[in-house]
Amino acid sequence: MLQRRIESIATAWAAVAVALVAGCESADKSDAQWLFFPAPPSEPRMQFLTWASGADQVEPAKGSFERFVLGDEPTIQRAINKPYGLAVRNGVVYVCDTKGLCLSRLDFKEQTYRIFGVRGPGRLRKPINMVIDPLGYKFVVDPERKQVVVFSPEDAYVTAFDIPEPCHPVDLALYENELYVLDNDESCQIVVLDRTTGAVIRTFGEPGAEPGQFRIPNSLAIGPKGFLYVSDTHNWRIHKLTREGEPVWVKGTPGNTLGRFARPRGIRVGPEGYVYVVDGATEIVQMFDPEGRVLMRFGGPGDLPGALGLPSTVAIDSSSIPYFEKYIHEDFNVEYLVFVASQYGQHLISVYAFGSFPEGYSLSESQLAALPKIPVDEGIGPLEMDDGATATDPEDQERNDDRD
């Protein structure tokens, strides 16, 4: 039974691969096929655009004459090793590379790729997540350094803020002059720092199963109205809190259907208040409204363009739309872009666009690509084994991954 299901999915993946490659190589948008979520007849709201894993997808390819004149480049890191956190601004995608121990800078505006944070006082030991403030300063959380490392708008090292012991900082969020840092050590604290000095302003949170208590929390974000959202991995839920830590609501239970979580990871909030939650086990991103009601999901397991491989987090940005315009359906009205990091596979950074078609618009079946369908009533997570057990999440092989 399991073998037949795997073979069926493999055949579907192969068909999708041909359709997507044909669409990407087409010079005429009218000949392309498009991957949307949810699939029709539901109203499409999310379009998969493209992917990148390093310099090859960002920089223009050199011709044979250019290679002859300039010669081969010196051996340097030209690809992302193992991405985790993301931040995006004005066509530039910054990636926390937890294996390359650096920040990768993919500039889709200038078509360049480089890395930084590899030497000197700004050398990173394990960058996990980051945020960018309105001035362009980057704040990177590093659990090995037990610090928040700050880089300038030009990517130069500025300073580092210490996190009070005991600490294992894994994510951070910015609201006005306050920097919220999430610890997922035994204290399960959220430490609020002054953005300019690094001084501790207050702390809140504790271990437990009640609202406002956490078990190995993984990620946090702040929405446009100033509420704090926390992904609580080993309680299989998400929290909405005030900035002082008072619970507003808690949503989620263990499971692999919509509205439930197998391994909630990165959490971010869009400009309209929609909450995006990455699930590392089911390999999807779920969307919720500001009250915690589930809206839809996108992605799915696999290693084809548009699918995800052990995803870690998500980033949301509207300033980069012009640099991805060539991938967008001409009639799809985009509000912002959604970037998702996968820790494994060929397509490490996936780019999606959130938007809508004009009322009454319809796409023909010949224009649509589709990932293998996973019926909601059968779950959206790992395949069931023949004996009824659930396939093992790769992260279970190393429990400490939940602290990254």
Image (cartoon, rainbow, N blue to C red):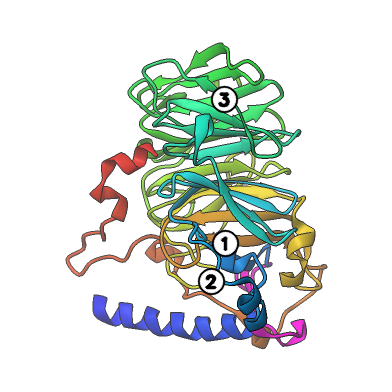
Residue 353 rendering spot, x and y as whole percentages = 69, 61
Distance between mark 2 and mark 3 Cα atoms: 34 Å
**Element at label 2:** loop
Asked whether residue 37 is in view, the answer is no
x and y percent of residue 160 in the render? 54, 24
- Specify the label residue 350 is tagged with: 1
Q: Residue at x 44, y 21 (%)?
A: 189
The correct choice, above or below, for 26 with respect to 404 in the image is below
Q: Tell me the amino acid under the disc marked 3.
A: Tyr
> Mark 1: which amino acid?
Ser
Of the numbered discs 1 and 3, the one sitting upstream in the chain is 3
Quarter of the image that includes the N terminus: bottom left
Residue 305, numbered circle: 2
Task: Mark 2 or mark 3: name the one nearer the start of the chain.
Answer: 3
Q: Which mark is residue 180?
A: 3
State whether residue 362 appears in this view: yes
Pointers 1 and 2 in contact (C-beta within 8 Å): yes
Magenta stretch encompasses residue 77: no
How crowded pointer 1 is (Cα within 10 Å; few <14, some 14-19, many 20+) is rated as many
User: Of the residues under marks 1 and 2, which one precedes in the sequence?
Assistant: 2
Tell me where residue 6 sits by quadrant.
Answer: bottom left
**Element assignment for label 3:** strand
Pointers 1 and 3 in contact (CB under 8 A)? no
The amino acid type found where label 2 is placed reads Pro
Q: CA distance from mark 1 to mark 3?
A: 27 Å
Up/down of 305 relative to 353, above or below: below
Q: Which of the labelled discs sits on residue 299, or is there none?
A: none
Residue 120 in picture, x, y percent from top left: 51, 33
Crowding at mark 2 (Cα within 10 Å: few <14, some 14-19, many 20+): many
**Magenta stretch, residue numbers:** 25-43
